[in-house]
Amino acid sequence: MNPNMLWQRTLLRGVTLLAVLIPWLGGCGSEQREASEPADRPTAAEPSRQAESEWRLLNEQRQKEEQDRLRLEKFERPRQLQEQQEAHKSTKAARAPAAARDAPAKAAGPAAPAAATPSESRLTPIAAVDRILDSLARANIAFNAPETINLAASAQIQLLLSLEQSIDDLRNALTQPGEKEGAQIRVSDRMEAHLTGQNFQITAITPGEQAITSIGTTEWKWEVKPVTPGRHGLHLTLTALFEVDGKSTRRAIRTFDKTIAVDVTLSQQFSGFVARNWQWLWTALLVPLVVWLVKKRKSRGARPIDTDT
């Protein structure tokens, strides 16, 4: 056989074999890819189902949030507003007494303390008094206290009270000598001041009970005269007057205690000693002196006898 023809037949067979193998190999590859693709990526139908599920969850979440908002507006919001109103009322009520205390006094003077109603006094008498005391205004006072007083002398005690002037201004306004004291106290529209001391003779120069005004200064004065020497105490008491259940009531606001030394001179000590012991001095000194004078006069009256005549 001709070699060229043999080579051509062999080539033709190879081409025929390739033509049969190539489609077969392509079909096997596509089957393998189709078998492996479901495990690697979803099909076209699966993405649509996943998106629908996500949209449904998002819609349900939005509906739940809308329901929560409506419930909050319907129930929670009114409750919160009510709590805020109650808190505001309680805060306002708590600040009212402090604001009343700090408010400047009117021209007519300090407001009279609110009198307790009969029903309030019967039910809560202590609470009614507490409410009145809490409503009292604040004022400054100053008074003098002499450190020493001579037994034969006297001194004046002066007390000044004002709702406008400071303690230092009231101290400077005192005209009587002595140590000057000052303080801040609560006052009503009527105040009473008393000065007491066991070893002093005290005379009030001004009325003990006086009305308090915001204009000017309220003044009390006493004349003090010591009775016995030594160190003795004076007591200054200020009392507020107000009404409870229609009855006038007194409440001691503050008491100031001062110790005053009563001194005496030597001549006062001698005269005092004579005044206290005159009976003993008459017996011990004056009687023997009289007896001696009588004897001396008798001895002068007896003359001696002259023997020469």
Image (cartoon, rainbow, N blue to C red):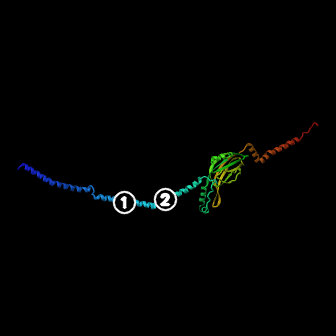
Kind of residue indicated by mark 1 = Asn
* C-alpha separation, residue under disc 1 versus residue under disc 2: 31 Å
The image position of residue 125, as x and y in percent, is 60, 60
What is the residue that sits farthest to the top in this orientation? 308
In the image, 282: left or right of 188? right
In this orientation, which residue lies closer to the viewer: 258 or 204?
204
The image position of residue 296, as x and y in percent, is 85, 42
The image position of residue 211, as x and y in percent, is 66, 54
In this orientation, which residue lies closer to the viewer: 25 or 270?
25
In this orientation, which residue lies closer to the viewer: 53 or 135?
53
Residue with the mark numbered 2: 81
Does the rendering let one see residue 39? yes
Residue at the image point whose x is 76% and y is 47% from the top: 275
In the image, 273: left or right of 66? right
In this orientation, which residue lies closer to the viewer: 163 or 8?
8
Task: Mark 1 vs mark 2: give the one in front.
Answer: 1
Residue with the mark numbered 1: 59
In the image, 281: left or right of 21? right
Does the rendering let one see residue 199? no
What is the residue that sits farthest to the right in this orientation? 309
